[in-house]
């Protein structure tokens, strides 16, 4: 028996979540966002499990080229666009859609000699102020792109929400209104919604929704849980108990002796640490499932191990532990570490083994 973490990845959960998102946005096409190694789940494998989606969203050209190399022929969208003529030509050759979010990228396209026209998504900054052309520049840049022989017409349109994960934040509607009024009457398809928008902004679904996190079975809403939207976790992070210690009351546990027993108790040591992607800032009290029961993590997270108080429960070396996933919401673990589910899923390190369950 090996005592190392395994990320179990379930195809049935992925398919369930895709069906849920389809049901929630029945009139929209689905662009599955698979950037950052499919949120830590494995890019090529997960994309190969998603033949029922209409396209994929990626952050970087390397990710899209890796998908093409694997034989993926789907529509791929580079959501940050490209930054050199060589990459623009690669995008054209490999039929990658590119997002255009500033004037430099417009100039790059105008000056390029491409083997074939490229499909673009002009991104509007409707208020997040990260990427996108400012509303005041929109008409002018849109007009230039309409004139460019390098651009396949019509031009598609996009924006991104800053706060859609906050249920009652009125800024999301304001962003929607700005985008709609700016782009009213133009041909081309539109996309606004990330997972949070797909789940809660049915009025903004337009022709394409582009969820990431929800595909993998986590709820992006602040304080939310996957079950609120009947989503299922695709990843379950599992490991094993590698030692069990009996300690008297008043004894410290772990680096810095930051936590002490308050009674005679037992501590299970689980093979999972920040060197595997478990968050070092998880506080004492963060739940860990051992043999299907919740117990509190105690003391500091180490590189290769965590310590868990199991009291007098019959926990033994070799028992199964779940760090997040089935039976233990990743959103809850993220809250205990003052972070978000996205970061936990993406942070899995290279020494964690992946077990794909078809
Ligand atoms: C990451 C990303 C998404 C997906 O966001 P989720 O919150 O994971 O659904 C959608 N659109 C853009 C532009 C992104 O960068």
Image (cartoon, rainbow, N blue to C red):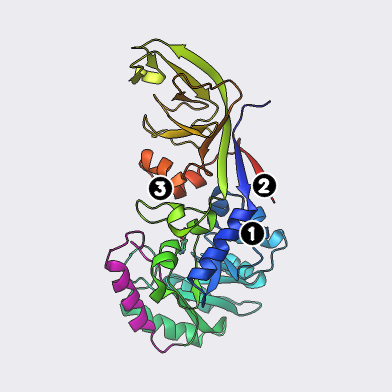
The circle drawn on residue 340 is 3
Q: Relative to the observer, which residue lies in front, 286 or 277?
A: 286
Q: Residue at x 61, y 60 (%)?
A: 15
Q: Residue furthest top?
A: 248
One can see residue 78 in this view: no
The circle drawn on residue 157 is none
139 on left or right of 100: left
Cα gap from disc 2 to disc 3, whole angstroms: 24 Å
Q: Quadrant of residue 300?
A: top left
Residue density around tag 2, few if under 14, some if 14–19, many if 20 or more, within 10 Å: some
Residue density around tag 1, few if under 14, some if 14–19, many if 20 or more, within 10 Å: many
Q: Relative to the observer, which residue lies in front, 124 or 93?
A: 124
Q: Secondary structure at mark 1?
A: helix
What are the residue bounds of the magenta stretch? 159-186
Cα gap from disc 1 to disc 2, whole angstroms: 13 Å
Q: Relative to the observer, which residue lies in front, 249 or 173?
A: 249
Q: Comparing marks 1 and 2, which lies closer to the viewer?
A: 2
Residue density around tag 3, few if under 14, some if 14–19, many if 20 or more, within 10 Å: some
Q: Residue at x 38, y 56 (%)?
A: 221
Cα gap from disc 1 to disc 3, whole angstroms: 23 Å
The circle drawn on residue 356 is 2
Q: Residue at x 64, y 79 (%)?
A: 116
Q: Residue at x 40, y 47 (%)?
A: 340
257 on left or right of 19: left
Q: Secondary structure at mark 2?
A: strand
Image vertical order of residue 332 relative to residue 116, above or below: above
Q: Relative to the observer, which residue lies in front, 258 or 135?
A: 258
Number of numbered discs visible in the structure rendering: 3
Image vertical order of residue 344 relative to residue 272, above or below: below
From the top left corner, tell me how far across and down residue 234 is, in percent.
57, 50
């Amino acid at each position: 028996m090996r005592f190392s973490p395994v990320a179990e990845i379930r195809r049935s959960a992925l398919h369930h979540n895709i069906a849920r998102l389809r049901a929630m946005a029945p009139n929209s096409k689905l662009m599955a966002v698979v950037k950052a190694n499919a949120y830590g789940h494995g890019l090529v494998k997960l994309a190969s499990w998603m033949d029922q989606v209409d396209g994929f969203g990626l952050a970087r050209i390397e990710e899209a080229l890796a998908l093409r190399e694997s034989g993926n022929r789907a529509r791929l969208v580079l959501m940050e666009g490209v930054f050199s003529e060589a990459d623009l030509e690669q995008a054209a050759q490999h039929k990658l859609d590119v997002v255009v979010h500033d004037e430099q990228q417009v100039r790059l396209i105008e000056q390029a000699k491409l083997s074939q026209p490229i499909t673009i998504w002009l991104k509007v900054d409707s208020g997040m102020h990260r990427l996108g052309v400012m509303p005041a520049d929109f008409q002018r840049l849109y007009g230039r792109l309409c004139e460019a022989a390098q651009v396949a017409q019509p031009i598609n349109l996009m924006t991104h929400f800053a706060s859609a994960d906050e249920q009652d934040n009125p800024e999301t509607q304001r962003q929607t209104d700005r985008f709609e009024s700016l782009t009213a009457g133009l041909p081309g398809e539109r996309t606004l919604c990330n997972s949070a928008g797909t789940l809660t902004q049915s009025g903004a679904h337009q022709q394409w929704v582009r969820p990431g996190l929800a595909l993998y079975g986590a709820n992006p809403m602040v304080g939310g849980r996957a079950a609120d939207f009947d989503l299922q976790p695709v990843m379950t992070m599992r490991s094993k108990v590698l030692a069990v210690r009996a300690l008297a009351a008043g004894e410290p546990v772990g680096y810095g002796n930051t936590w002490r027993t308050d009674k005679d108790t037992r501590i299970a040591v689980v093979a999972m640490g920040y060197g595997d992607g478990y968050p070092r800032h998880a506080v004492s009290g963060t739940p860990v499932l051992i043999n299907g029961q919740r117990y509190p993590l105690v003391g500091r997270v180490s590189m290769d191990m965590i310590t868990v108080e199991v009291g007098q429960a019959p926990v033994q070396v070799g028992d199964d532990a779940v760090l997040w996933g089935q039976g233990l919401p990743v959103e809850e673990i993220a809250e205990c570490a003052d972070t978000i589910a996205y970061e936990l899923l993406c942070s899995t390190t290279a020494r964690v083994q992946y077990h794909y369950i078809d």
